[in-house]
Amino acid sequence: MRITVCTVCPEFFDSFLSSTMVRRAMDAGAVDIIICDIKEYADGCFRKIDDSPYGGGAGCVMRCEPVVGAIEAVKAPESHVALFAPIGQMYSQADARRFARMQDLVLVCGHYEGFDARIYPYADEIISVGDYILSGGEIAAMAVMDSVIRLFPESLKEESTREESFENGLLEYPQYTRPAEFRGERVPEVLLSGNHEAIRRWRQEESVKLTEKLRPDLLEKRKED
């Protein structure tokens, strides 16, 4: 898989690209990550990528020419272009799995006060990572890449991702490790029993209880699906 990130802050990705899981996937040939500097597609000696909004208002808006130029420069016939913006659909684990099946993914990071609205049609979809505002789409892009890359068997063992939160429309069951007792609180006896069927049932029940308590919206969505 190839992932290309269009950004005005390419230096943001230096540590991400050197992280263990990402490097493992890249070294195994599972993913090729390209960082495209949008400033390279801006005209003039000052490489101006933003300007004041028509109609007035605070801040600056990313200009069409450099952003669209970057998208068109990196886009291939098989590319899927996803642009980050608050108006986008909320990103989910299902999206991570959908992206992981793609051959070529282009992620476009916003900055400043956002994109000129005429840029949006050049994306195949617009996504958001939450109902809050970031200074730029770079953190969102790293979150999406992490969620996608960790699904590759070259990154993590498949069983490590199979029962995680959101995979089955539920939160993951509580996890415990040594010691068996900490400050008077013991690990549930069923987990020490060696009875795998009983452990499986307990985990399923606890997943439902935890989801009902913390994220009842997930249960509602599960019923609708």
Image (cartoon, rainbow, N blue to C red):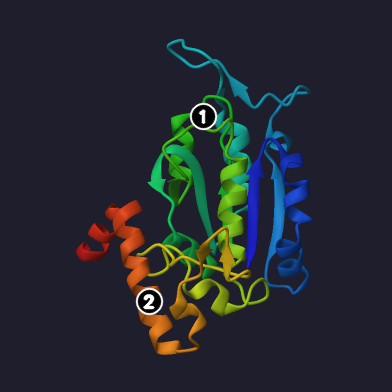
Q: Nearer the viewer, residue 2 or 151?
A: 151
From the top left corner, tell me how far across and down residue 162 is, in percent: 49, 75
From the top left corner, tell me how far across and down residue 99 is, in percent: 51, 63
Residue displayed at 46% across by 10% down: 56
From the top left corner, tell me how far across and down residue 213 is, in percent: 31, 54
**Crowd band around label 1 with a 10 angstrom C-alpha radius: few (<14), some (14–19), many (20+):** many
Q: Which label belongs to residue 114?
A: 1
Secondary structure type for disc 1? loop
Q: CA distance from mark 1 to mark 2?
A: 47 Å
- Residue assigned mark 2: 202
- Point out the image quarter for the N terminus: bottom right
Residue displayed at 64% across by 49% down: 5
Count of marks, rendered view: 2
Q: Is residue 5 left or right of residue 27?
A: left
**Crowd band around label 2 with a 10 angstrom C-alpha radius: few (<14), some (14–19), many (20+):** some
| Location of residue 154 with respect to 91 vertically, above or below | below
Q: Is residue 174 left or right of residue 35?
A: left
Secondary structure type for disc 2? helix
